[in-house]
Amino acid sequence: MKPLSNQQRLHLVNSEQLFQSYRIALRHADAYRFGMRWKKVRHREYLFRDHDRRGNGKMMGPRSPETEKLLASFTEGRKAAQERLGLISEKLQEQARLNKALRLNRIPRVVARILRELDRAGLEDSFTLIGTQALYAYEVAGGAHFLLELLASGDVDLLYDTRRRMTIVCTKLEGEGLLGLLQKADRSFERLSDQPYRAVNAGEFMVDLVIPPGGMRPSVPVTFGQADLIAVEVPSLQWLIHAPKLEAVGIDEEGWPTPMRVPDPRAFALHKAWLSKQVLREPLKKPRDWAQAQAVARLVQSEMPHLPFAEVLTALHADVRGMLEEVLGAAG
């Protein structure tokens, strides 16, 4: 683990502040995305507000001085929103160059694009980034960089919170499902026919849609559209669903800020430690699980004293809580 310099910390803060302004400007511009137009119905023109790219929308009234004024106001508002977004984008591009020069650019490009698309769709509270990629968020929160050997990974796991209403998620995905969103980030993503929970791009990077076990209730496929990914149940993930979450803004390989929502680092460390002891866990993954558990626990103890381990234990299973002493002993 290597602590960040004061200059690196300063630019992380600047990047986060700029990104928050960018998010606001982007959502404002997105409100004008589908436009407003005249539509002829039975030889009469009506002002029509599009709500999606499929032509769904709302009639605003027949052509009149009032609706013409409404269209003019809409057009002016869209122009102003686009100009503001353009100005902030230019500032972010300059900040991205500084971030790369300071070697803050850590998050793989494809991961960052996926996370930004989820954020743009308003789904930041419905999905949690778990697994190795979550380490980038802990780096930002703790002001340090882990060894690269702990970070290398060719996949990302998206944990869907099944307590969220699927109808709302489907609406925000605009009928294109999660696969459609992934293809906005990288058009080469395709669902694997023999593993419908997984999408793979041309670079063999994998995205898995995972959910916690459903318990005794009948199993209902979790999917968000036709031919979309179908979530797979993974044992033990209910503990990460119920654990607190940490939100951070990391920096991708191009220097651009990226919003991240990950499990609380204390829950991550204990869960990884528990995984490293499981008989059915792949032997090649166990040492890496244990190394990641130690690294994150050490970062929490040294750089995040406001996060005592005792506070997170109630959200975890007794077997996971039982790893506390061993993990802290190894980390210390």
Image (cartoon, rainbow, N blue to C red):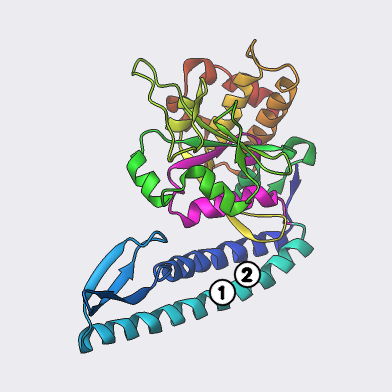
Write the residue at 56% across / 74% down: 88
Per the image, the residue denoted by label 2 is: 92
Instruction: Determine the image quadrant of residue 36.
Output: bottom left
Observer-nearest of 305 and 151: 151
**Is 137 drawn above or below residue 161 in the view shown?**
below
Vertically, is 86 above or below 290? below
Write down the region rendered in magenta. Answer: 104-133
In the rendered structure, find residue 88 and report the number of the disc placed on it. 1
Residue 332 to residue 13: above or below: above
Report whether residue 247 is seen.
no
Q: Is residue 123 magenta?
A: yes
- Residue 60, percent from left and from top: 23, 73
Residue 127 % position (x, y): 48, 41
Contact? badges 1 and 2 (CB < 8 Å): yes
The residue at 46%/44% (across/down) is 177
Would you say residue 226 sits in the magenta stretch? no
Looking at the rendered image, the quarter that the C terminus falls into is top right
Type of amino acid under label 2:
Leu
